[in-house]
Image (tube, rainbow, N blue to C red):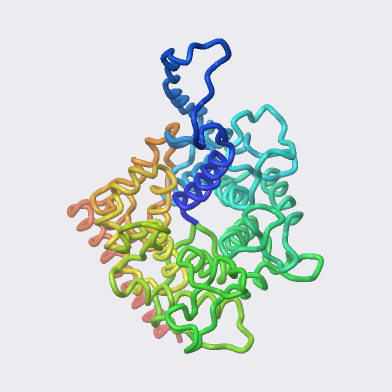
């Protein structure tokens, strides 16, 4: 689930609330004069609109925008992106994230006053909680906080085995997929976490997969976010990318997998989670084939119905395809991202940079030169300075990066000398054996 979409949904709900609370007096008609005022008197000047309060970013939090709807989410993604780039977040950043956790283990989207205990009005959600678990799992030594968060997720699991964004509402593919990733990151088998009805996360996820049948048309193999009011499933790119990754038991930080044959949408009477995921991969590969990117759905009522590129979900699709063994189907989209994602990431901040780093990590691409952009440097600049982790270089990398041409020549001579010495020793050993009576 992209951070842009999370914020848009929350802001839309906020706008509706504001409209509903608007004073009825301004709906129409004259405003009655104040008692004692002369009818011919000039009306009192209207107060000037209040200036919006400046956004205060607490120390340790990544990003400069209002964190009300995505503070924990963007912090968690930033930390995962840094881990994938071999960078450890600053202690201040880790402390901020852990300070957001409620006593019951859940995480809200943002808690401006962490010293104040959470109560029934604190808007906790499964997405922030699952993302925080995945972020904490990259640090080591965070087991108590992770266990409390997992216990809360268990407590709000739906009867069908899945999760919703807000507890008490129907399961959706995105939330269920994020929880699968969190359980996996914490070393908990998703199939072992069951509802009282005996259902697990995969039961809910497979139930949102669109069958690979002719009747499904272009949606075949995709996942729906949720069924509509009539129970119909419609393809959702965001949900599909998340479900493909989760269907094979992967989390957001996933390394490259050797590419195999192109995915196929295969009908199955008894659809397994892995088969559903691979069918979803076939849908994503087909959706990317035309332009190399996914498109945003048209906004309701918009005059311009021309499709616009969906950069965030394209990055998620690259991650999902590559981590499930279909990297060849993501190559074109990866190159498209390198050329077209810079301005988008700069506008959307740490979570966007992290999404691109996670896609680069899955494809074994250098995130410090992603289309000429150092994603790691830009991500790090949005928060407290992190620490670089020393990563031992592989023998191949050492041969290519840490030794100059003269050094390679010396190494070559040493290796050849060892080979010759070994051969001489072998011949001497044979002669001694044959010389024995």
Q: Horizontal and vertical percent for residue 11?
A: 50, 44
Q: Residue furthest left?
A: 406
Q: Residue at x 43, y 24 (%)?
A: 49
Q: Residue at x 32, y 54 (%)?
A: 366
Is residue 261 shown above or below 394? below
Q: Residue at x 65, y 42 (%)?
A: 123
Is residue 160 shown above or below 14? below
In this picture, residue 329 sits left or right of residue 195:
left
Residue 124, image quadrant = top right
In this picture, residue 221 sits left or right of residue 181:
left
Instruction: Out of 14 and 71, give the one closest to the viewer.
Output: 14
Q: Horizontal and vertical percent for residue 432?
A: 40, 79
Residue 311, image quadrant = bottom left
Instruction: Out of 388 and 58, give the one closest to the viewer.
Output: 58
Instruction: Out of 374 and 36, give the one closest to the viewer.
Output: 36
Q: Residue furthest right?
A: 196
Q: Horizontal and vertical percent for residue 85?
A: 41, 49
Is residue 327 shown above or below 17? below
């Amino acid at each position: 689930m992209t951070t842009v979409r999370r914020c848009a949904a929350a802001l839309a709900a906020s706008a509706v609330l504001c409209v509903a609370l608007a004073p009825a007096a301004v709906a129409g008609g004259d405003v009655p004069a104040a008692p004692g005022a002369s009818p011919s008197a000039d009306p009192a000047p209207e107060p000037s609109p209040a200036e919006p309060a400046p956004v205060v970013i607490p120390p340790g939090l990544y990003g400069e925008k209002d964190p009300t709807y995505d503070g924990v989410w963007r912090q968690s993604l930033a930390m995962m992106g840094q881990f994938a780039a071999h960078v450890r977040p600053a202690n201040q950043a880790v402390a901020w994230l852990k300070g957001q956790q409620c006593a019951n283990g859940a995480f809200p989207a943002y808690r401006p006053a962490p010293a104040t205990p959470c109560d029934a009005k604190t808007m906790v959600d499964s997405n922030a909680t699952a993302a925080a678990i995945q972020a904490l799992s990259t640090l080591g030594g965070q087991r108590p906080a992770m266990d409390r968060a997992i216990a809360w997720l268990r407590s709000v699991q739906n009867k069908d085995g899945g999760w919703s964004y807000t507890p008490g509402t129907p399961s959706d593919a995105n939330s269920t997929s994020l929880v699968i990733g969190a359980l996996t990151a914490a070393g908990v088998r998703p199939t072992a976490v069951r509802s009282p009805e005996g259902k697990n996360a995969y039961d809910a996820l497979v139930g949102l997969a669109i069958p690979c049948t002719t009747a499904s048309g272009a949606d075949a193999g995709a996942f729906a976010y949720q069924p509509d009011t009539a129970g119909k499933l419609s393809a959702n790119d965001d949900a599909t990318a998340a479900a493909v990754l989760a269907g094979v038991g992967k989390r957001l930080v996933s390394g490259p997998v050797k590419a195999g044959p192109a995915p196929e949408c295969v009908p199955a009477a008894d659809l397994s989670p892995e088969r559903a995921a691979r069918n979803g991969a076939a849908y994503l590969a087909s959706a990317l084939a035309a332009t190399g990117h996914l498109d945003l759905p048209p906004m309701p009522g918009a005059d311009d119905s021309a499709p616009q590129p969906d950069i965030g979900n394209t990055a998620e699709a690259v991650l999902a395809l590559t981590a499930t063994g279909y990297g060849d189907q993501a190559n074109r989209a990866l190159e498209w991202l390198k050329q077209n994602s810079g301005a988008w990431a700069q506008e959307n901040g740490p979570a966007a940079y992290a999404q691109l780093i996670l896609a680069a990590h899955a494809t074994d691409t250098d995130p410090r030169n992603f289309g000429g952009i150092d994603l790691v440097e830009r991500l790090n600049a949005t928060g407290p300075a992190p620490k670089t982790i020393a990563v031992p270089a592989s023998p191949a990398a050492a041969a290519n990066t840490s030794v100059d041409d003269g050094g390679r020549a010396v190494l070559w001579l040493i290796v050849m000398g060892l080979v010759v010495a070994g051969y001489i020793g072998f011949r001497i050993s044979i002669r001694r054996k044959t010389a024995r009576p």
